[in-house]
Amino acid sequence: MAGKKVIAICQSGGEFVTEEDGSLSYRGGDAHAMEIDEQIKYNDFRMEVAEMFNSNVDNISVKYFLPGNRKTLITISNDKDLKRMINFHGSSSTTDIYVLAEEIVAPDVSNMPASRSSRTTLSEAGVLVEAPLNVIDDINQPADMLDTPFVILGDTTNIDDHIEMPGEMAPPPLSVGSNDEKHIKAAQQWQNNITGVGQRFNSVHEFREALRKYAIANQFAFRYKKNDSHRVTVKCKSEGCPWRIHASRLATTQLICIKKMNATHSCEGAAVTTGHQATRSWVASIVKEKLKVDPNYKPKDIVKDIKQEFGIQLNYFQAWRGKEIAKEQLQGSYKEAYKQLPVFCERIMETNPGSLATFATKEDSSFHRLFVSFHASLHGFLQGCRPLLFLDSISLMSKYQGALLAATAADGNDEVFPVAFAVVDAETDDNWHWFLLQLKDALSTARNITFVADREKGLRESIADIFHDIDVHHGYCIRYLSDQLIRDLKGQFSHEVKRLLVEDVHAAAYAPQTEGFERCLESIKSISLEAYDWLMQSEPVNWANAFFSGARYNHMTSNFGELFYSWASDAHELPITQMVDAVRGKVMELIYTRRANSNQWLTRLTPSMEEKLEKESLKSQSLQVLISASNKFEVRGDSIEFVNLDHWDCSCKGWQLTGLPCCHAIAVISCLGHIPYDYCSRYFTTDIYRLTYSESIHPVTSVDRPMHNGSSQCLVTVTPPPTRRPPGRPTTKRFGSQEAAKRQLQCSKCKATGHNKSTCKEFLLEC
């Protein structure tokens, strides 16, 4: 594993939540990327991570997950731990690192032992309370219902009751204590909302809200006898109870006045026999302010908080519905956002001249797809980035689902540079074709381009067809290729064997010469002839370094833009215009930050390239160069290589694959008294990097402001797509190869894979 490099995606400021299967996922926070290898020291790594997040190096801890295990966080605390982490992720080009702040907890008044944990907080009473895990994600939003009151029973309610949703059973609400006196303190302020006959309200809505809060504070339920825009008659829900109230509109005004009221209850203890009354809109009004502070406020926590503050036992569904209403009140309507899409596209191009923002609808005017590429991104790619584009996608788990397609590039410091993206109703060959058409129109260049993308998304034909007028190369993503291989294998292979196959496929892809490629394929052949034949038929010329004719700079996977996809994932619950604007804000901030940082650089190359060049220079010191009259040289070390300075070529292919001189080339360059910098790709220079980020993205003006030009595009009506989020917990697309880590289903009767005993045909025939 000598020389193994991994891109560490460092994340901080978010929170861990536990999924239903017990695995942990990380939500929110910021992320930075850095390249590490086995030579890096733990203290250097820790200091760089602390600098990334402006943290005190003494107050952070660094953790990660083992491949295939997201239930246990592993701590990195010394050089050996760091090296192990790199080795554990040997088959992956990236790894997730979680940077946790170690806060010193104040001493407890009850002399509890001090504790430091990212999962604990200090309550107002000074008691350590473990943050709730197993948090339940949002379930599918059902069709809209009338805003009629629902009854929540009091202490006699079985809090294990749950509501059955299409596709799955909603979990029961969280059980809490039964101290009613403590619970209803928050509602006591509403006990005098209704004072009696003659009390006036500005509207029917205001009267209903006051009545609802009054019932909650006094712990009884009511039902409407009459309820319209000018009169409301209400009686106690308990049979035979005389409590009732009647209010109606005062003539020639909008005021509502209480005309009759019997304030006496004959029912026994309302909290015991009847319960409390509330509506979804009331729940929304309670949680709205908390959602502003914490957008990840979960329905399960809403259930617990409302029980503690108001003594009302909601079920999960009621809390979820209230949250959805509150979100729409804060964010705006999803439907309204689609209607604003034409004006929004015009705003983007108006405030960012040179940008391309366009959309398409179906015949019924429903949303089909949206393409966005900002001028600053197009300029940065054309002027400063290598002619290399990564195409990938993620699913959007919003109300109307869909997918995000994106084209990202690698800047001179080997960091992700967003170029263009599209929101589409579904990931289809037709939508990819449309996306590439818009991308070519936005780039409007004859520059040769290498694409790194999946070979199974209809991209092979689309790339060749749309970019037929330029020299274009399509490098297959090795991650998708190895995943497809594992899926297609029909033999019975163990978990460990699959892992070895994936490792050999990656080694074959990275091998710079045909000899190394053939050795890896022979290793695969010794394991599975089927896998060997599959790979030989998968067009190695499109994925193996030994044969690929394009310039992919040793980037083998299409998920290079993970940082960009994480921004979209964080904003996917927003209405479409707000989601796009949230991504725009992230890209705008990224450009500004990197421009400011690069202005402080004093090196000729970008930091990551300076580091790589320095490592190659150290290797070159032990090499022997045989001087030649021409510009072709022989270099001897562990192997004999041949360097051609005129063509920037070395027989090891390291120079050609990376754009930086390899150790053999540097040995020759130094021997001749030349400077290695003169033989580096111009894309790695600090000057070109600064040119990449020289343009800015500007804020998009409000869609409510009238347009200066009467664009016909703004007259188009756009409605939401017909797709809706299905029942159940949304699935999450995870980056990196997952297939090799899955346990394969095996029949206990015939020992074949892919089925179990209950569906085994041989077993059924015997029966």
Image: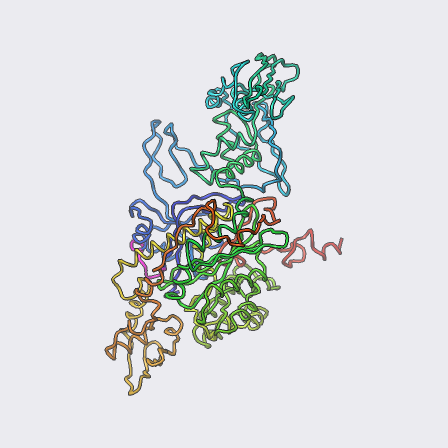
Residue drawn 34% across and 73% down? 662
Decide: is 677 above or below 54. Answer: below
Picture colour scheme: rainbow
Left or right of 266, for residue 542: left
Of residues 743 and 545, the one nearer the viewer is 545
Of residues 457 and 367, the one nearer the viewer is 367
Looking at the rendered image, the quarter that the N terminus falls into is bottom left
Q: Is residue 449 visible?
A: yes
Residue drawn 34% across and 30% down? 108
Q: Position of residue 577 (x, y in %)?
A: 49, 48
Decide: is 32 above or below 548. Answer: above
Residue drawn 30% across and 62% down? 607
Q: Is residue 88 visible?
A: no
Extreme residue toward the left, this view? 673
Left or right of 697, for residue 743: right
Decide: is 302 above or below 26. Answer: above
Q: Position of residue 102 (x, y in %)?
A: 34, 42
Left or right of 662, for residue 569: right
Q: Position of residue 638 (x, y in %)?
A: 34, 76
Q: Position of residue 703 (x, y in %)?
A: 47, 47
Extreme residue toward the bottom, this view? 629
Of residues 91 and 731, the one nearer the viewer is 731
Tell me if residue 581 is in the magenta stretch: no
Magenta-tinted stretch: 35-44
Q: Quadrant of residue 412?
A: bottom left
Q: How many marks?
A: 0
